[in-house]
Amino acid sequence: MDIILCHIITDFDALGAAVGLTRLKPGAKIVLTGGAHPPVRDFLAFHRDEYHLIERRSVKVEEIGCVVVVDTQKRDRLGKAAEWLSLPHLKSIEIYDHHIDSQTDINPTYSQIEAVGATTTLIVEQLQQKAIQLTTAEATVMALGIHVDTGSLTFEATTPRDAAALAWLMAQGANVRQIRTYVDPGLSPQLQQLLTTALDNLHSQTHLGYTLSWVLLKTPDYVPGLSNLASRLVDLTESDALLLAVEYRGREGVGSREWGVGDKG
């Protein structure tokens, strides 16, 4: 049996890549290793049965032949399922990821780690090469993966490959109405600049498999929409919890606000 592992607090990119891999590996099952981002959780409440998902406790460990890890390269991002990477009878371990600067502590049999905007893009390219036709449900969740991780093709890490992959998914029947429901509106130019600053100054620490991040931003005045910025930071940094503090100088002096974003699953 092939098992595809999404990282703890699964986002749409991890889920989309995993769904695509089930078409490349018939019979493979997807395991969410520990919770999901709120939009993903809401999406699966309606569409879970359309994908090859299985609970971790339902996996027959002795039948696992291959473990595939998507959208991460770290054992501590896989919760208790990380134990499966050390099974003596395991035949292979594969990694698919787009975080090229991430340090890995997994020794894979095969890995594809490339500088694209979304891991889903890497899987879409394989599906295209094999001329595999997707269902609407498959195309939709994969399109969501690319939309969310590239800011609908607006983030600096976005590449022409992401745009081409998204176009192909649209041609495969991705449901635009559903995508619109689960994709946040794009950030304003001012928030885009603050996003870049936040990424350059972000501090992170991992404890018990959860990544905690924090950052302090200073702005001339109050900036609306900072809660959307906080959510974006969580998605881009694979953080499970984030503290975003903003200090600004208004007419009456200095003010500050804090946003905490996270989901313990």
Image: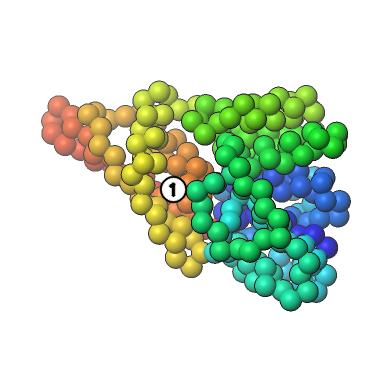
Task: Please provide percent x and percent y for residue 200.
Answer: 36, 41
Of the 4 image quadrants, the one containing the N terminus is bottom right
Residue 211 seen in render: yes
SS of the residue at dot 1?
Answer: strand
Determine whether 176 is above or below 87 in the image. Answer: above
The C terminus appears in which quarter of the rendering?
bottom right
Return the x and y of residue 206 as percentages of the image width and height. 44, 61
Q: Residue at x 50, y 48 (%)?
A: 101
Q: Which residue is mark 1?
A: 261
Looking at the picture, tell me which residue is in the foreground, 4 or 98: 98
Residue located 29% across and 44% down the image: 216
Q: Residue at x 39, y 54 (%)?
A: 204
Residue at image point 36% right, 25% down: 190
Badge 1: residue crowd in 10 Å (few <14, some 14–19, many ≥20):
some
Q: Nearer the viewer, residue 202 or 141?
A: 202
Q: Is residue 201 left or right of residue 211?
A: left
| Quadrant housing residue 207 | bottom left
Look at label 1 and name its amino acid: Val
